Image (tube, rainbow, N blue to C red):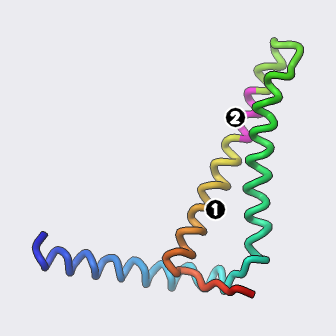
Amino acid sequence: MPNDNRRLLLEINNAVAEVNRRTINPVLQQLNLEQLKPVIEMVAQSRADYLQCFFGLTNQEKKDASDQSHIKRLAGLRLRYEELLKAMQALETAIEREYIDVSRK
């Protein structure tokens, strides 16, 4: 790759980092572990709810119309879990790339 291209890509990367930090950091000012615990617990609970519903399919005595409602509930729980997981991953990325200040306190 020519040096001009590398330099441009580096400048783009720096601009992206600067814009993300300038945009995100004021919204989520200096997070700490205590502030993150409720988010972590919410994701874990959504995972537990999804898996509990999944295993609940095997415990049903009647495998008729109630099975369809159970599948519909499972799909809703999956969507909730996946959205929360993606949000958690976005938060982790923002912390990793230093778009957000974090504190150990």
| Quadrant in which the C terminus is drawn | bottom right
> Sequence-wise, which precedes: disc 1 or disc 2?
2
Say if the magenta span includes residue 19: no
Q: Position of 17 compared to 66: left or right?
A: left
Magenta residues span 71-77
Inspect the image, locate mark 1, and give the three-letter code of the amino acid beneath it: Met
| Quadrant in which the N terminus is drawn | bottom left
- Tell me where residue 95 sits by quadrant: bottom right
Residue at the spot of label 1: 88
Inspect the image, locate mark 2, and give the three-letter code of the amino acid beneath it: Ala
**Neighbourhood count class around disc 2 (C-alpha, 10 Å): few under 14, some 14–19, many 20 upward:** some
Which residue does the image show at 70% across and 47% down from the upper left? 80
- Tell me where residue 49 sits by quadrant: top right
Circle count = 2
Is 10 above or below relative to 61?
Answer: below
Percent of width and height locating residue 64:
81, 12
Percent of width and height locating residue 104:
70, 85
Is 67 above or below relative to 28?
Answer: above
Which callout, 1 or 2, points to the residue nearer the camera? 1
Query: Which disc number belongs to residue 55?
Result: none
Residue farthest along the right direction in this orientation: 61
Residue at the spot of label 2: 75
Is 9 above or below relative to 41?
Answer: below
Q: Nearer the viewer, residue 31 or 22?
A: 31
Percent of width and height locating residue 92:
58, 68
Percent of width and height locating residue 90:
56, 64
Which residue does the image show at 48% across and 78% down from the upper left? 20
Q: Main secondary structure of the magenta part?
A: helix
Cβ–Cβ below 8 Å for labels 1 and 2?
no
Which residue does the image show at 34% across and 77% down from the upper left? 13
